[in-house]
Image (spheres, grey):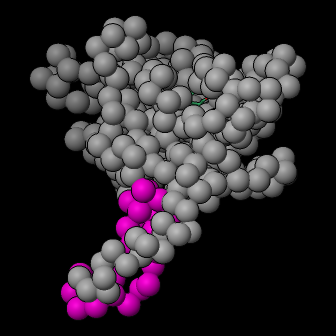
Amino acid sequence: MLRNAFIDAIFSSPDGHYIDCTFGRGGHSRALLKRLSSRGRLLALDRDPEAIAAGKALEQQDQRFTICHSDFAQLSASLENEAWGKVNGIGFDLGVSSPQVDNAERGFSFKQDGPLDMRMDNSAGQPLSRMLEHTSERELVDVLRSFGDERYARRIVGAILKALHNNTLHSTADLENLCFHAVPKQARYGGSHPATRTFQALRIWVNGEMDQIDTGIRAAMDALLPGGKLAVISFHSGEDRRIRDLIETAVRPCTCPPALPVCVCGKKPSMRWLQKKPVRANEQEISANPRSRSSMLRVAQRLSEAEAVKLAGYCGGLH
Ligand SMILES: C[S@@+](CC[C@H](N)C(=O)[O-])C[C@H]1O[C@@H](n2cnc3c(N)ncnc32)[C@H](O)[C@@H]1O
């Protein structure tokens, strides 16, 4: 969702070159291709082999479009491999796609029974079931707290470890049931399902999503032409904070500690905010797709060298 705002944010010229880092099933890519001339180009990435298969079909139909099996951590390498120079716009629509969530076999959903997998790229890495075999109580509590803001992390992790020990945790239905009974009775009804935060946190852990965001957003900012734009849609506050901080570091002209009387870092900014306060989905979008309720869009723009030099003096050497 937020599709129009997202496309408006990264689009600048019909002849431009663009990257969609999260192809999914190509909703954003197709909307962007509609705005491009025959000289415009779009490169899309995804780490999910099923998304790549869908992208290959689009590649056959549209010569302006290229799909690449890559995660965010490989973004720079993929751009080099594909011989892409700097681009006019890059977009990220983070999280899981509807086809991933709706396919029980992928193990993302607590609403359907499936294996404990949760890998976006199920051709690589370890499924959740294997990762749970090698984890510790401390690590799991940290995962649930950091990536899910789960207040009952300790109780849920205790129940997970007990079930692993008793060999009774084999499927997403087992995990859902375990979360439901691990939280206090008053927390079981009324709000979101007691397994929501645990499933989100474990998915982020299995896919190394926070590290992926760090590398991907930095590589994306480096890949932009002066004036090129970066748009990011995220789905929960932890992710959004990470994105805000990554961009803010590139926007801030000075990194000296505030206690220093004069600027000694000499840092130049490389980006400016176009949309610092996140845009949220409107009521119409939410009723069409309830999953968009928590989506947030942030937009920033790459500075030219001249603009960067001008803004570097922003702190005037004084704090
Ligand atoms: C919310 S969906 C994107 C939906 C897409 N905008 C559309 O219109 O169909 C997110 C997609 O990004 C992919 N993805 C998430 N994290 C990724 C990463 N670190 N590297 C590459 N792809 C990733 C997922 O596999 C998923 O297909």
Q: Dominant secondary structure of the magenta stretch?
A: loop
194, 246: nearer the viewer: 246
Q: Quadrant of ligand 1?
A: top right
Q: Quadrant of residue 252?
A: bottom left
Q: Quadrant of the N terminus?
A: top left
Number of numbered discs visible in the structure rendering: 0
- Residue 267 lies, in percent from the top left, at 45, 79
Of the pair 21 and 102, the residue shown nearer to us: 21
Magenta residues? 247-272
Q: Is residue 186 magenta?
A: no
What quarter of the picture does the C terminus occupy? bottom left
Is residue 309 positioned above or below 211 on the image? below
Q: Quick check: 81 above or below 291?
A: below
User: To which quarter of the image does residue 255 belong?
Assistant: bottom left
Displayed quadrant of residue 312:
bottom left
Locate residue 40, reporting x and y percent. Answer: 75, 33
Give the residue displayed 44% in from the left and 27% down from the top. Answer: 5
Residue 63 appears in the figure: yes
Does the magenta segment cover residue 265? Answer: yes
- Residue 236's spot in the image, x, y percent? 36, 37
